[in-house]
Image: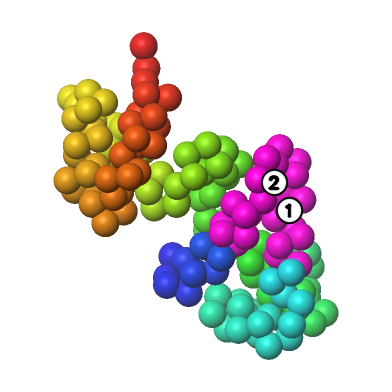
Amino acid sequence: MNNEQKNWHNEIIDRLVDHKGMDQDDFHDVLHDELDNMVIYNSESQRIVDDLNYDVFQENDLFGRANNINQAAYAALYELFYEEGSFTYEDYLNYEKHNMTEKQIEILERTDKIKLLNIDGKVNYIYNGFREQFPKEMLDEAREYFKSNLKL
């Protein structure tokens, strides 16, 4: 993903995680509502199409050919989220449970795969290697994350 794609993808994620307590159906409904909200204004839709290098004349497999810039922007965001992105309902649950950013969860997941470290070792690794993303006040949440993923 290039920077523009990452920025738009993160914008969608930020909008999703603002909604608390969603079930899986709500997740997809809210996603569509938020995509709709993102393409209300023609100028913003044009920016989305430009940033995502979306061909407004292409025939989209799901939506067909766009009749206007707003429909093209919606299709571009939809494709970005479902085809390029990697934020799932399970990621939403993890975010809600741990109230962490996608980057923080990614770091925790990578660290959790280090089998030679116990929970305290993983927490120390996080603190020493990623202090900017994990200040001291977040270490308890990191510890809880590792405990919840502990394989017996």
The residue depicted at 52 percent of the width and 56 percent of the height is: 85
Q: What is the residue that sits farthest to the front in this orientation?
A: 137
Residue 34 sits above or below residue 105 on the image: below
Q: Measured from the top left, where is residue 132 in percent x and y? A: 26, 56
- Magenta region's main secondary structure? helix
Direction from residue 19 to residue 140 in the image, left or right: left
130 or 65: nearer the viewer: 130
Amino acid of disc 2:
Phe
> Residue 48, labelled with which disc?
none
Q: Which of 82 and 38 is in front in this view?
A: 38
List the residue tagged with mark 2: 27
The percent coordinates of residue 16 (x first, y second) are: 63, 54
Q: Does the magenta stretch include residue 17?
A: yes
Q: How is the image coloured?
A: rainbow
Question: Is 28 left or right of 142, judged from the image as shown?
Answer: right
Say what amino acid the circle numbered 1 marks. Answer: Val
The image quadrant where one finds the C terminus is: top left
- Answer left or right for 2 relative to 21: left
Q: Residues within 10 Å of mark 2 (few under 14, many from 20)?
A: some
**Extreme residue toward the top, this view:** 152
Q: How many labels does the image show?
A: 2
User: Disc 1 vs disc 2: Cβ atoms closer than 8 Å?
Assistant: yes
State the residue lying farthest toward the right.
67
Which residue is painted at 49% across and 69% down in the image?
Answer: 7
> Residue 94: x, y in percent?
51, 38
Q: What residue range appears in magenta? A: 12-36
Reading the image, the residue beneath label 1 is 30
